[in-house]
Image: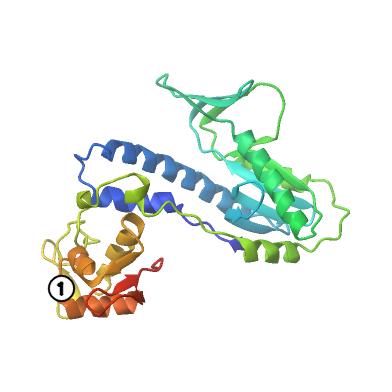
């Protein structure tokens, strides 16, 4: 059963918005392109594993991207709760040749072109998550075995390892790995564990990205981007938005612009900032849009501040 389904990482969504509104000549543009590719690869691998696990008939609860309060930072890619134990999966969607070194513990990736990149050994993160989960369960008087594994989703990687450590699996190994876990002698309800996890799950985002990456807000393209031709050429006509470039119309085109503003600039916005964002002059129209999409935070009528939610 899927309790917390897959969703793209906040970094992926934010970087997509950033690259759509940042001029390609910006000095950091290539860096953000590479970062987006890395985030998308991670998302793709995690989504693939989630889809694979959904096909199993085993009795378990499945979570994607779990952040829990604990003595150690806990941000788990995929969490599985079974009657025989909790399984924490650290997903690594990496191509090329991977060497997992023990002293010091590092992941060294070599691409087909010979480029070498050194990363933190995923076992270090996984050990931290296991300890963090133990601490979380102890706080809620729950006793159940905890397992962890590093999972590579695809066979486009050659893995070399120094010494022993936590299990390293390919995606196709997961069903047998779960099936062969030792039987648990503790009578712990997985529904109880699931309930405790869901009540304590936290959210974490890097927003606003302009502050996170120290980007000048003036570098961000204002306007409403047409979902068809991708030009910033949407204007208001009667009760809809009309693209002057391709003639596409959309009633809710402003929602994505407000979502971009939230991810890139901030979670508060004024009437004037809204008009600048949407390229409109009508203060009453901006007010109606903000009242329909936001919560009033305070300020005088003229300088009222609205709080943007995480828009659907």
Q: Residues within 10 Å of mark 1 (few under 14, many from 20)?
A: some
* Res 53 seen here: yes
**Can you give x and y, in whole percent of width and height, for residue 116 in the image?**
45, 21
Residue at the farthest left position: 244
In the picture, measured across the screen, residue 12 lies left or right of residue 45, that is: left
Q: Residue at horizontal 70%, vertical 50%?
A: 133
User: Where in the figure is residue 180, as x and y percent of width and height?
Assistant: 78, 44
308 w.r.t. 92: above or below = below
Between 217 and 32, the one nearer to me in the picture: 217
| Whether residue 75 is situated above or below residue 281 in the rendered picture | above
In the rendering, at what x and y percent does residue 140 appear?
76, 60
Quarter containing the N terminus: bottom right
Can I make out residue 82 in this image? no
Give the image quarter of residue 306: bottom left
Residue tagged 1: 236
Q: Residue at x 46, y 52 (%)?
A: 9
Q: Position of residue 72 (x, y in %)?
A: 64, 46
Give the residue furthest to the front.
Answer: 300
Q: Is residue 162 left or right of residue 99?
A: right
In which quarter of the view is residue 28 placed?
Answer: top left
Asked if residue 240 lies left or right of residue 179, the reply is left
Task: Please report the residue visible at 34 percent of the width from the left and 75 percent of the height from the top.
Answer: 298
Q: Residue at x 29, y 36 (%)?
A: 30
Query: SS class of the residue under badge 1?
Result: strand
The quarter of the picture where residue 62 lies is: bottom right
């Amino acid at each position: 059963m899927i309790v917390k389904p897959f969703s793209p990482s906040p970094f992926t969504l934010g970087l997509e918005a950033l690259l759509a509104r940042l001029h390609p000549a910006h000095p950091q543009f290539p860096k953000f392109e590479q970062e987006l590719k890395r985030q998308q690869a991670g998302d793709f691998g995690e989504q693939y594993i989630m889809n694979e696990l959904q096909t199993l008939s085993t009795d378990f609860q499945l979570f994607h991207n779990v952040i829990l309060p604990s003595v150690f930072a806990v941000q788990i890619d995929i969490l599985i709760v079974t009657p025989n134990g909790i399984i924490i999966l650290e997903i690594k969607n990496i191509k090329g040749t991977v060497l997992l070194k023990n002293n010091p513990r590092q992941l060294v990736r070599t691409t087909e072109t010979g480029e070498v990149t050194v990363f933190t050994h995923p076992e270090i993160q996984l050990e931290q998550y296991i300890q963090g989960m133990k601490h979380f369960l102890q706080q809620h008087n729950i006793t159940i075995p905890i397992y962890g594994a590093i999972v590579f989703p695809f066979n486009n990687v050659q893995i070399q390892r120094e010494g022993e450590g936590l299990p390293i699996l390919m995606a196709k190994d997961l069903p047998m790995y779960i099936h062969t876990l030792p039987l648990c002698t503790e009578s712990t309800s997985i529904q109880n564990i699931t309930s405790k996890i869901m009540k304590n799950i936290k959210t974490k985002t890097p927003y606003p990205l302009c502050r996170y990456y120290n980007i000048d807000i003036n570098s961000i393209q204002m306007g409403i981007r047409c979902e068809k031709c991708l030009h910033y050429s949407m204007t208001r006509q009667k009760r809809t938005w009309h693209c002057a470039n391709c003639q596409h119309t959309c009633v809710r085109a402003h929602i994505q612009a407000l979502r971009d503003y939230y991810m890139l600039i901030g979670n508060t916005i004024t009437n004037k900032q809204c008009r600048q964002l949407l390229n409109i002059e009508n203060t009453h129209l901006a007010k109606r849009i903000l009242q329909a999409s936001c919560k009033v935070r305070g300020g005088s009528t003229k300088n009222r501040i609205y709080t943007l939610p995480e828009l659907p």
